């Protein structure tokens, strides 16, 4: 039976409201249970009616073929109406849609020290730390078209430069416009991690990744960076901390490498340190290898409604029944 249904194309047909077909015997049940309708009317007594009836020709008995045809027509019309109400549908071939399986947040330090021109390019020239970071982030974003990516910039405060989005072109345009000290001269690492955690709370993807890039140490966040990292880890966020600059620097420009290592360890990630543009590019290539793109597959099966076909059949049968009734009355009274 299954093979026959597939050959006839019936295996792809379903009824959205199949329970409606349980109403199929309703007219016959009503005919059995309800009393016959008799229309009471006033009549005129005529004494000679019996004599006239005896003299008149006896009426012909009802034609059983015609009654059978009427019952079949009514049953077919009722069945088609129920089929229309049951909402028949044809199952179309499944459609698979792949979407992002990860939300990735890039946190970029814009403190005053990011304008220091101590990074050597492959060509041997000097560029600022921020310029080197922008070039590496551009390439990193271009290699991850399947991820929803957002950007946070931080200095004396943290701000969402771009929320999670698949529109990477707009994100790259915004990233190209940032300048050192845009968010203030200081380095609030804890504020950046806390803002990222808030952004991830509204995210739907299961994969949650934060890549924090900084060239300094925390200068007074309300929430200590390690505590913020622990909160983020509780939300399923993995953190990779990337430091850049001179590890031997002192004062406000000093790097807190042990603190960054603790942040990464608390959130299940790793810490990396870059001393030039080539090593920075290699770090993001390594993260790209460690954290491959994720894809979430969503399978949907479209349904094409077919209720109009049985409804059209019911309308045609109803019109045919009305036309036949009108013709019989015309012949009877003609």
Image: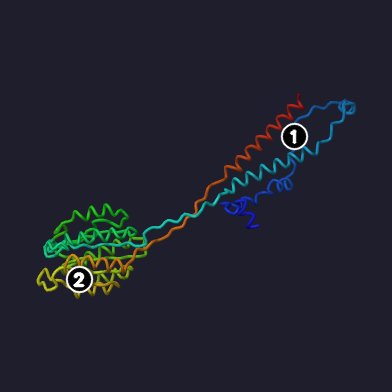
Residue 129, position in %: x, y? 15, 63
Placement of the C terminus among the 4 image quadrants: top right
Q: State the SS at label 2.
A: strand
250 and 93: which is toward the camera: 93
Q: In terms of image quadrants, where is residue 285? A: bottom left
Mark 2 vs mark 1, CA separation in Å: 102 Å
Residue 324, position in %: x, y? 71, 32
Which residue, given by chain and number where applicable, does mark 2 sit on? 273
Q: Earlier in the sequence, mark 2 or mark 1?
A: 1
Q: State the SS at label 1.
A: loop
56 and 155: which is toward the camera: 155
303 and 81: which is toward the camera: 303
Task: Judge whether 116 appears above or below 226 on screen.
Answer: above
Pick out the residue farthest to the left.
251
What colouring method underlies this structural image? rainbow
Task: Judge whether 234 appears above or below 106 on screen.
Answer: below
Residue at screen point 38% across, 61% down: 295
150 and 200: which is toward the camera: 150
Placement of the N terminus among the 4 image quadrants: bottom right
Which residue, given by chain and number where applicable, does mark 1 sit on? 40
Residue 51, position in %: x, y? 90, 26
Q: Taking 210 as reference, is 26 left or right?
A: right
Q: Which numbered disc, 2 or 1, marks the residue closer to the eye?
A: 2
């Amino acid at each position: 039976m299954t093979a026959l249904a597939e050959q006839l194309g019936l295996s792809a047909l379903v009824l959205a409201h199949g329970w409606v077909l349980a109403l199929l015997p309703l007219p016959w049940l009503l005919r059995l249970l309800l009393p016959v309708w008799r229309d009471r009317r006033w009549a005129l007594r005529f004494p000679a009616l019996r004599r006239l009836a005896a003299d008149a020709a006896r009426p012909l008995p009802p034609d059983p073929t015609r009654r059978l045809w009427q019952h079949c027509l009514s049953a077919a019309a009722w069945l088609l109406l129920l089929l229309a109400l049951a909402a028949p549908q044809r199952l179309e071939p499944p459609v698979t849609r792949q979407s992002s399986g990860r939300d990735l947040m890039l946190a970029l330090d814009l403190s005053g020290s990011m304008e220091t021109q101590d990074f050597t390019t492959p060509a041997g020239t000097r560029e600022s730390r921020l310029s080197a970071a922008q070039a590496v982030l551009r390439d990193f974003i271009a290699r991850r078209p399947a991820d929803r990516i957002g950007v946070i910039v931080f200095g004396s405060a943290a701000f969402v430069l771009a929320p999670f989005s698949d529109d990477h072109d707009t994100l790259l345009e915004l990233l190209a416009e940032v300048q050192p000290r845009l968010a203030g001269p200081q380095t609030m690492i804890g504020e950046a991690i806390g803002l990222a955690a808030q952004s991830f709370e509204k995210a739907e993807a299961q994969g949650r990744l934060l890549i924090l890039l900084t060239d300094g140490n925390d200068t007074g966040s309300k929430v200590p960076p390690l505590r913020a990292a622990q909160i983020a880890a509780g939300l399923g966020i993995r953190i990779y901390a990337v430091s850049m600059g001179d590890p031997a620097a002192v004062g406000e420009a000093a790097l807190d490498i042990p603190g960054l290592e603790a942040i990464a360890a608390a959130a299940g990630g790793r810490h990396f340190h870059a001393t030039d543009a080539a090593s920075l590019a290699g770090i993001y290539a390594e993260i790209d290898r460690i954290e491959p793109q994720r894809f979430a597959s969503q399978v949907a099966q479209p349904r094409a409604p077919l209720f109009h076909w049985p409804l059209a059949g019911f309308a045609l049968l109803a019109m045919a029944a009305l036309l036949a009734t009108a013709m019989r009355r015309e012949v009877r009274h003609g």
